[in-house]
Amino acid sequence: MSFVATGWQVYAVRGSPLDLGLVGLAMFIPLPLLALPAGHLADRFPRRTLLAIAIAIEAAIMIGLFAVTRAGANTTWPFFLAAFATGFAAALGYPASGALLPSLVPREILVRAMALRSMAFQASVIGGPAVGGLLFALHAELVYGVAAALSGIAFVGMLFFRSGRESAGGSSSGLAHLFVGVRLVRRTPVLFGAISLDLFAVLFGGTVALLPIFARDILEVGPAGLGVLRAAPAVGALCMATVLTRWPIRHRAGRTLLVVVGLYGVTIVVFGLSQTMWLSLLALTAGGAVDDVSVVLRRAILPLVTPDDVLGRVNAVEMVFLSASNELGAFESGVAAALLGAVPAVVIGGVVTIVIALSWSRFFPALARVDRLDELRPTKTAVP
């Protein structure tokens, strides 16, 4: 909900696509700086505690945005500051969150568990933007009030959460241990190929940051329409996640990953060229569906090839890749739209994504050769 409101408010202040990109840049800055320390914390301390602290920070951010909106929200700097704080919370919480689920289920059903988790997440992504757009149309600050209340509920729930296994705890805190995740990713071609594929595909093929421009200037559907556009990819992802819980991908997982990323690029091109709401929604929905296959496969590969005692640190490395693709990708989209226009920026990004998917089997043949995910085994670490 808050992303819909923030995007609309930032673009409304000066009508600048670059401001939308700067929000993504502000959110990105803390992530690479804090990722490795946060990953190390996730392997030394209870992961649920770290995640609860991150949620509490997010609740405080929502309260701050409520106050800013109530005061008029006629400058952009408070939103940049809130984006920076959101990046800080994400840097703290993501490694712990990513390491939590694999401790709860056997590896034999991990792909289905990842798909089920994706269903829960996508359900919130569907409801959030749609409800957020409607609440914003009724009363702008109402969005942040509801978001703060829901974050508070999540915080209380996390305090009562119990995981099957906690972090390793008590490990050394030397600099060598801090970089274990980096070394493991670098010498595991399947993992490095999967997360770098996501990095470059979303970096150039992202459209979310530019949706306020399409909603306001191209499709002319207003803030409620923006909420629907933001929810469309999640609708497709939820449908696909439902399918994957029933029929998980059992063979040719590597090839499937490359194919769906290429199809994602195709949907981006269609969205960029669309001038009608129904076609834009169809393209975004299809994009969300194929992207969810990529997300489930990548999120399953990571814990399958990573020992549990370094899972937090490897998740931290993945977070840097994801933040570079999402938040830095939002900045890239804003700059490209400011220089070329929103439509050319989106179309060119989709074409680049297709080219990346076609070339990745040459760069990472080990990834392309992956057949059954349950045949993957953890990579040994040089430092515990």
Image (spheres, helix red, strand yellow):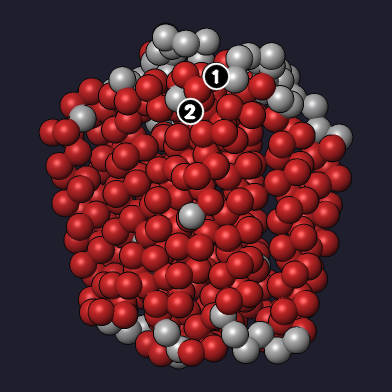
The foreground one among 214 and 145 is 145
> Which residue has dot 1 on it?
174
Does 215 appear above or below 210?
below
Mark 2 lies on a secondary structure that is helix
Residue at x-position 31% and y-position 80%: 338
Can I make out residue 374 in this image?
Answer: no
The foreground one among 183 and 107 is 183
In this picture, residue 370 sits left or right of residue 57: left
Q: Position of residue 176 (x, y in %)?
A: 47, 19
> Which residue has dot 2 on it?
314
The amino acid marked with disc number 1 is Gly
Residue 308's tag is: none
Can I make out residue 68 in this image?
Answer: yes
In this view, the mark in front (2 or 1) = 1
Mark 1 lies on a secondary structure that is loop
Q: Position of residue 2 (x, y in %)?
A: 65, 68
In this picture, residue 211 sits left or right of residue 224: left
Q: Position of residue 25 (x, y in %)?
A: 45, 62
Q: Position of residue 380 (x, y in %)?
A: 42, 9
Task: Name which quarter of the figure residue 279 lies in.
Answer: bottom left
